[in-house]
Amino acid sequence: MDNIPFQKGLYETGNGIFAYLQPDGGWGWSNAGLITDGGQSLLVDTLFDARLTREMLATMADAAGVGADDIGTIVNTHANGDHTHGNGCCQHAEIIASEASAKEMDELPAPALAAIMAQAKDLGPTGQYLVDIFGSFDFTDVSEKHPTKTFSGEYSVTVGDKRVDLIEVGPAHTAGDVLVHVPDDKTVFTGDILFIEGTPIMWAGPVSNWIAACDHIIDLNPDTIVPGHGPITDIAGVRRVQDYLHFIDGEARKRYDAGLSVRDAAHDIKLGDFSSWGDSERIAVNVSTLYREYAGDTTPPDVTQLFGLMAELKR
């Protein structure tokens, strides 16, 4: 789909399927999708706040004739707020997510994010980093709505005569990542299993699951691949994400075996071919997750500390 530019807006990829793109694809600037057929419609993900979601829905109403009240189903590809905070803008929609994602949605509700951002100016360099990456979003204006249906493994729905397969591939990026596959139209919406031209961030792992999720996308042999962040891509784009995951696994393992700390390893790893990707400081989270995996440590990460380390790497 090289003909679709990476510019903000709604793009029909063919046969009643649309991608909604948000440059630059960095923190919070996520993509969404719309699947329509026979007067029915399914929305793949909402956006980071209600204002952005309402703007997207207005664009869909104008361009595709599908208004907020027309959307019968929302699929959340995972729990992060930049894919869920506008769920309630579609009042009549059934909301489907993996069971693991539904549980994870409670962990950082929008009011908690709003409280953190209200205090950011008092948090020194870490706070400034939070303002830099999240300051464009209004976490006091969200429309949260939890899933009304959950599943584990695989689940299929129909939109008109289209079959849409929901394939759980997490834990990887998060606890419950889901691919949305429209087989007859050879289209996959990947959620944050794919960041294109941006650095993937591995909150959950294990890395082997994420690499396997990329293999699953490749095996589906889609013509159109809409990532969670970044421009529409192809199989080569999937392989590049896999290459990054293999690379950081190898580099982190060497430093773990050598006894380096997470902080020292994150500073020490030279990203080489991947250094041009946005948000490269996410290596801090990736190393931390990999170190916990190597150690068999199942305790949750210290997110505050990790944002501090990302701020340090960014500087």
Image: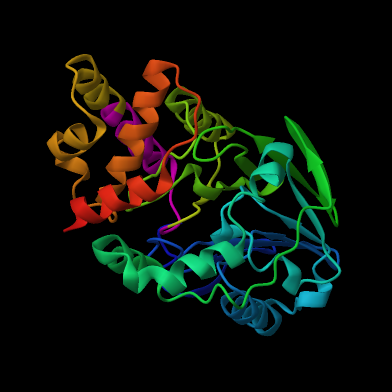
Question: Is residue 182 at all visible to an observer of this figure?
Answer: no
Is residue 241 magenta-colored? Answer: yes
**Residue, far front:** 122
Q: Residue 45, how many percent across, how many down?
A: 64, 59
Position of the C terminus by quadrant: bottom left
Residue 68 % position (x, y): 76, 76
- Nearer to the camera, 171 or 132: 132
Residue 231 forms part of the magenta stretch: yes
Image location (x, y in percent) of residue 75:
71, 53
- Whether residue 214 is visible, yes or no, is yes
Residue at the location (62% across, 38% down)?
176
Can you tell which quarter of the image residue 186 is in?
Answer: top right
On screen, residue 305 versus residue 269, left or right, reads right
Quadrant of the rendered image containing residue 178: top right
Image point 22% across, 14% down: which residue?
257
Image location of residue 141, percent across then percent down: 61, 78
Q: Nearer the viewer, residue 187 or 70?
A: 70
Main SS, magenta region, reads helix
The reply, left or right, for residue 296 in relation to residue 269 is right
The reply, left or right, for residue 68 in relation to residue 3 is right
Q: Is residue 109 above or below residue 168?
A: below
The magenta segment is 230-248
Residue in view at x 40 percent, y 44 percent: 201
